[in-house]
Image (cartoon, grey):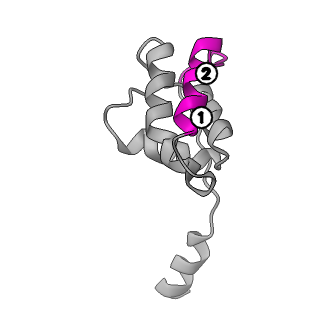
Amino acid sequence: MSTTTLLRRFSNATFTHRPTTPNPAFAFTPTNLTTAKSILAKYPEQYKKAAIIPLLDLAQRQNGNWTSVNAMNAVAELCGVPKMRVYEVATFYTMFNR
């Protein structure tokens, strides 16, 4: 098998995030949910994904200064983006404690 064939074959793999620590349930408090909706209101409908960073920050502050997978899932649901997009942001920026 050639290198090109190998690269093509493995580039279509689906990756999932597997947490290494227990994941407690997460839901925004009513106050933080109101704050999250006001953050989302600042962005046009087609650019809701731009709110991922401020929403992750809000979730991290609520969650005892760390970002759990369930918190990231809640942010993805609010923004209407795939969960992997939020995981990418949370793992790229060092300000989010995983």
Q: Which residue is mark 1?
A: 75
Question: Where does the image place residue 63, in percent across and percent down from the top left?
Answer: 50, 15
- Magenta residues (range): 21-41
Q: Nearer the viewer, residue 68 or 38?
A: 38
> In what quadrant of the picture does the N terminus appear?
bottom right
**The quarter of the displayed image where residue 90 is located:** top left
Residue 37 belongs to magenta span: yes
- Mark on residue 29? none
Question: Where does the image place residue 4, in percent across and percent down from the top left?
Answer: 50, 86
- Residue 42 higher or lower than 2, as above or below: above
Question: Where does the image place residue 10, in percent across and percent down from the top left?
Answer: 57, 70
Q: Secondary structure at mark 1?
A: helix
Measuring 38% from the left and 30% from the top, which residue is drawn there?
96
Measuring 41% from the left and 16% from the top, which residue is drawn there?
65
Kind of residue at badge 2 = Thr
Q: Using residue 22 as the reference point, say whether residue 80 is left or right of it.
A: right
Residue 35 belongs to magenta span: yes
Q: Using residue 96 as the reference point, say whether residue 11 is left or right of it.
A: right
Kind of residue at badge 1 = Val
